[in-house]
Image (cartoon, rainbow, N blue to C red):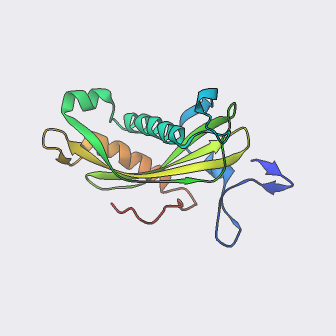
Amino acid sequence: MTVENNQVECGIWDKAGSCQISLTLLETLPVYLHKTIPPEYMDIMGHMNIRWYFDMFAKSGRKFFTSHGLGEDYFRDGNFGVFTLKQYIQYFAEVRVGQTVAIHTRLIGRSDKRFHFMHFMINETKTRLAATFEALITHADLKMRRAATMPTHIADRFDATLADDEQLDWEAPVCGAMRL
């Protein structure tokens, strides 16, 4: 638990100014990327350029996919892949060169063809939430270039993660524009 001025560090605030989700709760989610920000990520404003947020979220997504059976071998050998249908990024605090971030991930839901997840980028140096990335992804048949049902062994892995994530005692702060 992070403490500043005798208060628990908050990850997500609600509209009334109360802490909705503590940083401690976000930090319990699995980490799919851990990185110290190099000088080449800096922009003219003196902080990390937005393209690097997206790059790190994309790399975290690939690791998340791979952990559920959607790795390069699956894509190459099975003629299957994934398409991004929607994505939403929110920025909460700047990240600067030399600071270390970790990206934690929560699965929100899944259907037979789609899955909805959220990344939380935590600036570990400053002990605060820097950004979130929410995405809706569809499993795809690359021969037909259309959405396709996930095979059972992939769906089962997502179901196991979802069962764990549904046990969390906090609601994910979704944007509300994504539906399975």
Q: In this view, does 111 lie to the left or right of 123?
A: left
Look at 61% across and 39% down and name the residue there: 48
Q: In this view, does 23 lie above or below 59?
A: below
Picture quadrant where residue 42 is located: top right
Q: Please report the residue visible at 64 percent of the width from the left and 67 percent of the height from the top.
A: 14
Would residue 22 be found to the left or right of residue 5 on screen? left
Q: Please state the horizontal and vertical placement of residue 153, each as a whole percent of the image.
A: 28, 39
User: Looking at the image, how many numbered discs can be counted on the residues?
Assistant: 0
Give the farthest residue toward the front: 44
Tell whether 36 sits left or right of 155.
right
Seen at 26% across and 38% down, the residue is 81
Name the spot of residue 50 as percent of width and height, x first. 54, 43
Residue 133 appears in view? yes
Q: In which image quadrant can residue 37 be found?
A: top right
Compared with 46, 92 (above or below) is below
Q: Residue furthest bottom?
A: 16
Q: Nearer the viewer, residue 93 or 70?
A: 93
Residue farthest toward the left in the current orientation of the protein: 144
Q: Is residue 30 visible?
A: no
Q: Residue at x 67, y 33 (%)?
A: 97
Between 8 and 122, the one lying in front of the other is 122
Q: Which quadrant, please, contains the C terminus?
A: bottom left
Measured as percent of width and height from the top left, residue 74 is found at 27, 31
Please tell me whether residue 43 is drawn above or below residue 91 in the rendered image.
Answer: above
